[in-house]
Amino acid sequence: MDKNLMMPKRSRIDVKGSFANGPLQARPLVALLDGRDCSIEMPILKDVATVAFCDAQSTSEIHEKVLNEAVGALMWHTIILTKEDLEKFKALRIIVRIGSGTDNIDVKAAGELGIAVCNVPGYGVEEVADTTMCLILNLYRRTYWLANMVREGKKFTGPEQVREAAHGCARIRGDTLGLVGLGRIGSAVALRAKAFGFNVIFYDPYLPDGIDKSLGLTRVYTLQDLLFQSDCVSLHCTLNEHNHHLINEFTIKQMRPGAFLVNTARGGLVDDETLALALKQGRIRAAALDVHENEPYNVFQGALKDAPNLICTPHAAFFSDASATELREMAATEIRRAIVGNIPEVLRNCVNKEYFMRTPPTAAAGGVAAAVYPEGLNGGYYTGALHHRAHSTTPHDGPHSTTNLGGSSSSALAPPPPAGANNSVAAAAAAVAAAAAAAAALLPSPVPPNAALPTVPHLSPQVGGLPLGIVSSQSHLSAPDPNNHLSSSIKSEVKVESTETP
């Protein structure tokens, strides 16, 4: 008999069992909401997620399977997600905007629903800065209009025809360029503009002192001062409810007569009707817009259709072959981090991180207010000081203080609290000091040499019965377990390892 037949049968390996690094999880679904091409995203996500595209202009066009099962979403700027739209998604935990602006997402509503919203602020800085300078140069040298005249067959037979056609051309050196917002792109524009001879000033109230010194720029502290001093104004700030129509009838009147205006930031920053009137009256000599309040921009409709001296481009300042690839890779990588890691700790550019900070209930113990310790989604705490907004004119709360309380033996013995808890700890220290003073006041004067002084209560590393440190309980906002909500139709046997570094 064949010896092979007599050998005991090898036990079958259960590939669905537990491994040393944990059980396999179902493959989550990630959807590209308003596009079709996933060729760049697929190689980055294929081993940890199923990627689908929707090519939708609204959530009414999104397939029910995506609404019910997608845990991650990638989106461009052509779809808008309101609170009602976000509520349609049953399992969504992260949205990554393929771009820098998030004004087409209700970020607050997303946070309240436990959905992290991320963007990609680092891409296309050079492209947008170069486009901005291109538009500025076109306004000053009128290259766009002169080229169109040649294309239309206009003959320039002498200096009189050139003077007439090129009327309005201006010299750059010595003029003042005013930048509203000095973030990544604003800084890049400033460095380029200085090389052309511009005197560059900027207005950004949310930057620390000294930025102007490091870049060799001039800082102004009010928008009115910037508009009054600038020969050309370029917008580089985010759009929010506080600066909608930043350029309006009132602010245009504060600009120098005959000034130029450039907008490569967000279309909603400019009131089109007011701009059209200012162009027709010559109050603004010329304007260049790469972004528009209503996109895609239609040259035959809207307030700007008959406006003279206007250059409009189709929201393309960000684009180059290199930047487009870089942008999509960075967005897909952020989704990957969310899948293999913990939300929000692993996310690089989460714009609503504050909604994922858990705090234990405050309590009073011995007259000392309880300190608040924010905790992350999966047991760790998020320190606000690590999430510092480096730019934009968007009003926001400053980072939590990380100042140490020096000279306090009790604080030296207690575990270092997360940023944001210093006010409460300071109050606790003040309360202890007051208790010590009150105890000292009860002593007879003078104190007998051998008298025992009353002990001052030590500041225990507990507040309201809670130990200082991390609260280990899980929140309803914790990163989702895909097995809880994904259908069996998209489950996979691919093993997901947390190998990404935050």
Image: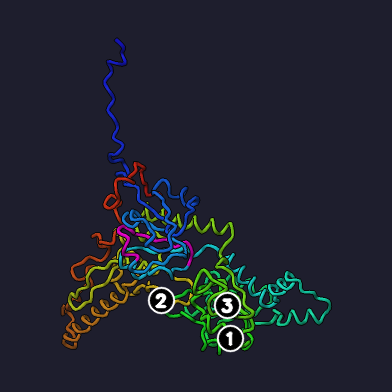
**Mark toward the start of the polypeptide (1 vs 2):** 1
Q: Is residue 190 magenta?
A: no
- Residue at label 1? 278
Question: Residue 154 location, x and y as percent?
Answer: 76, 74
**Under tag 3, what secondary structure?**
loop
* Residue at point 35%, 65% (across, down): 85
Point out the stretch of residues depicted in magenta: 85-100
What is the C-alpha distance between the residues marked 3 and 1?
14 Å
Mark 3 and mark 1 residues within 8 Å of each other at the beta carbon: no
What is the C-alpha distance between the residues marked 2 and 3?
36 Å
Would residue 418 be seen by someone viewing this image from the given angle? no
Q: Nearer the viewer, mark 3 or mark 1?
A: 3
Q: Is residue 91 magenta?
A: yes
Question: Residue 413 location, x and y as percent?
Answer: 28, 67
Callout 2 environment at 10 Å: few (<14), some (14 to 19), or many (20+)? few
**Mark toward the start of the polypeptide (2 vs 3):** 3
Would residue 48 be seen by someone viewing this image from the given angle? yes
* Viewer-proximal residue among 189 and 412: 189
What is the C-alpha distance between the residues marked 1 and 2?
32 Å
- Residue at label 2? 396
Identify the image quadrant of residue 372.
bottom left
The quarter in which the C terminus is drawn is bottom left
| Rendered view: 445 above or below 106 | below
Question: Residue 462 location, x and y as percent?
Answer: 22, 68
Name the amino acid, label 3: Lys
Name the amino acid, label 1: Ala
